[in-house]
Image: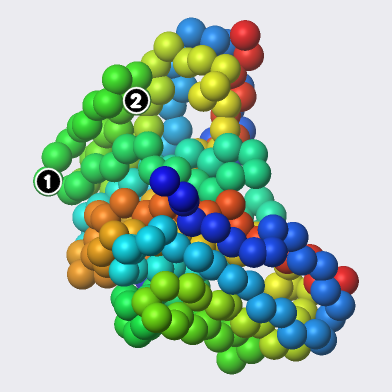
């Protein structure tokens, strides 16, 4: 079955710097890749997603890139702010399934 | 509007006892999902409901775990004869429709501790 690996497990950056989180997946049949942000005491919230027919997607300070050949995708956060501090999860799913396979999460800390 | 709610928020139980966890999805959402989040791990899929049917229950770890959904709304996840390895946060999510790519809205979870 599908397996998703996520790195790093923790990431500390200075406010204003960029943060990059990387994930790799194992099954080439996966074609949908969402990213979730989980704040303390809350459930994960979708922040951006990408399908395998595009290589990059942006939404203000957040962008996701996908390399289908290498089977990896990354989350890029620019101009980080303290409120970006949270745990971020990547996930993958295959066509015709509603099951998301999640990475193990990255705890991002943005220091003022 | 109201989001996904789960109860209880915390549950401590003794090994061997049965527990029931409840999920109230967003009104009108036809799809409902249960995930489990163990310490330091990602979210692990348990089961997916479309209406009252469960087309995918492949993630239930053992026959001690079961779930039902009634009236296309509230869902209950039941764990029988709890074990210490069942300790985790159990998250419920709902989406307007099932299907890949439909945004899933997660509840805050139920933290289960088995002593």
Query: Counting other residues with Cα less than 10 Å from the Cα at mark 1, is it few (<14), some (14-19), or many (20 or more)?
Result: few
Question: Label 2, on which residue?
Answer: A62
Q: Quadrant of residue A101?
A: bottom left
Residue extending farthest to the bottom is: B63
Q: Position of residue A50 (x, y in %)?
A: 24, 42
Using the rendered image, report if marks 2 and 1 lie on a common chain.
yes
* Residue B28 falls left or right of residue B18: left
Q: Which mark is residue A53?
A: 1
Viewer-proximal residue, B48 or B2? B2
Left-right relation of A96 to A76:
left
Q: What is the secondary structure assignment of the residue under circle 2?
A: strand
Place of residue B98 in the rendered image (x, y in percent of width and height, measured from the top left) = 27, 67
- Which sits in the foreground, B33 or B1? B1
Foreground residue among A32 and B97: B97
**The image quarter in which residue A67 lies:** top left
Say what secondary structure mark 1 lies in. Answer: loop
Horizontal side, residue B70 vs residue A111: left or right = left
Q: Is residue A41 above or below residue B19?
A: above
Q: Mark 2 vs mark 1: which is more N-terminal?
A: 1
* Label 2 vs label 1, nearer the camera: 2
Residue A105 visible at all: no
- Crowding around mark 2 (Cα neighbors within 10 Å: few <14, some 14 to 19, many 20+) is some
> Going 30% across and 33% down the picture, which residue do you hit?
A64
Q: Chain of mark 1?
A: A
Q: CA distance from mark 2 to mark 1?
A: 19 Å
Look at 25% across and 54% down and name the residue there: B101
Q: Is residue B88 above or below residue B49?
A: above
């Amino acid at each position: 079955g599908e397996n998703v690996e996520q790195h790093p497990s923790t990431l500390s950056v200075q406010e204003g710097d960029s943060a990059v989180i990387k994930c790799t997946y194992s099954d080439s049949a996966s074609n949908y890749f969402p990213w979730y942000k989980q704040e303390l005491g809350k459930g994960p919230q979708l922040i951006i997603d990408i399908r395998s027919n595009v290589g990059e997607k942006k939404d203000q300070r957040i962008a996701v890139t996908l390399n289908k050949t290498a089977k990896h995708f990354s989350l890029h956060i620019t101009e980080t702010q303290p409120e970006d501090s949270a745990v971020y999860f990547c996930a993958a799913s295959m066509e015709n399934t509603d099951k998301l396979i999640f990475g193990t999460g990255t705890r991002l800390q943005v220091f003022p | 509007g109201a989001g996904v709610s789960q109860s209880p928020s915390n549950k401590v139980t003794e090994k061997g006892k049965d527990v029931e966890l409840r999920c109230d999805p967003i009104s009108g959402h036809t799809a409902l999902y249960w995930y489990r989040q163990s310490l330091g791990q990602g979210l692990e899929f348990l089961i997916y409901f479309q209406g009252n049917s469960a087309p995918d229950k492949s993630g239930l770890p053992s026959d001690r775990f079961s779930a039902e959904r009634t009236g296309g709304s509230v869902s209950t996840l039941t764990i029988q004869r709890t074990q210490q390895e069942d300790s985790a946060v159990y998250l419920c999510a709902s989406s307007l429709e099932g299907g890949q790519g439909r945004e899933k809205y997660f509840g805050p979870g139920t933290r289960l501790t088995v002593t």
